[in-house]
Image (cartoon, grey):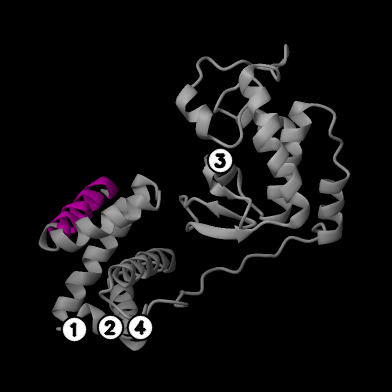
Amino acid sequence: ENTKINLMKESKYKQMRKAHNEEISGFTAYLQKRNYANDTIRADSNYTASFLAWTIQQQTQITEVTYNELLTYIDHSTGEGDSKTLLNRKLSAIRKYYDYLLYKGKATKNPATGLFIKNKQHTVPSNLLTIEELTAIYENYQVIDLRSQRNKVIIGLLVYQALTREELEKLEITDIKLHAGKIEIQGGKHRNPRTLKLESLQMLDLQEYISITRPEILKGKGIYGTGRKPDSINQDKAQTQLFISMHGSDDIKNSFLHLLY
């Protein structure tokens, strides 16, 4: 029964995407350039097409939609049986769509900014480390070889920029802007792309890693006799990826596992 309902929904979305093909195609290309996952792009395209269809029914120009009209859309969607989780996903898609319109110069504001549906409350974790304790972890980390030199740079990005493992794996050398003291983070499944400030105490370690440590690892001087060796190495990706394994591989999942321990 659920499969049948999902097929009906997908068929309905397909018709809506077709009716707004030009707009949805441009929006999809915009999301792809920002490295969103395929599933996210498909869902956002569906929800945006549905929203565009609703604006036509309301005889409202998309660039003239207001915050209050979005509240009316929420009421409409709630009446259709949408859960709070689904409503927030739709609002997320609408926010991205208006960001796209702003990018194209077709809109002057994003009416969905700051509009969220309150869902279940989440308990804030207790006993979190203070910034002083986190800084101490970074500053006291012992550097004794190429691996620990690489790991200290990773710890710095975890502590000061709060990067996720997914973001660390995606980092490329060109994302580090040492002269500007900044780092560019690529977008992911749950995060938008952004530019963050580098702390001054990170700069020297990053510069040494990029200019000395990383090339040494790539040349093979950092290869360890222990540890699981990759079945294959993507040489092209390893040449551009910021962090690589001690075997010169672009696959660094095991490296993060050992660092976590």
Residue drawn 33% across the image and 68% down it: 103
- Residue 227 to residue 59: above or below: above
Q: Secondary structure at mark 2?
A: loop
Which residue has dot 1 on it? 60
Region rendered in magenta? 2-17
Which residue has dot 4 on it? 71
Residue 213 position within the rendered picture, expressed as x and y whole percent measured from the top left: 70, 30
Earlier residue among tags 4 and 3: 4
Q: Badge 2: few (under 14), some or many (20 or more) residues near its Cα, within 10 Å?
A: some
**Front tag of 2 and 4:** 2
Viewer can see residue 130: no
Residue 12 is one of the magenta-drawn residues: yes
Earlier residue among tags 3 and 1: 1
Q: Main secondary structure of the magenta part?
A: helix
| Marks 4/1: CA–CA distance | 14 Å
Earlier residue among tags 1 and 2: 1
Q: Can you tell which quarter of the image residue 144 is in?
A: top right
Earlier residue among tags 2 and 3: 2
Left or right for 158, reference 15:
right
Residue drawn 47% across the image and 58% down it: 192
| Marks 4/3: CA–CA distance | 44 Å
Q: Can you tell which quarter of the image residue 121 is in?
A: bottom right
Which residue has dot 2 on it? 65
Which residue has dot 3 on it? 173
Mark 1 and mark 2 residues within 8 Å of each other at the beta carbon: yes
Viewer can see residue 188: yes
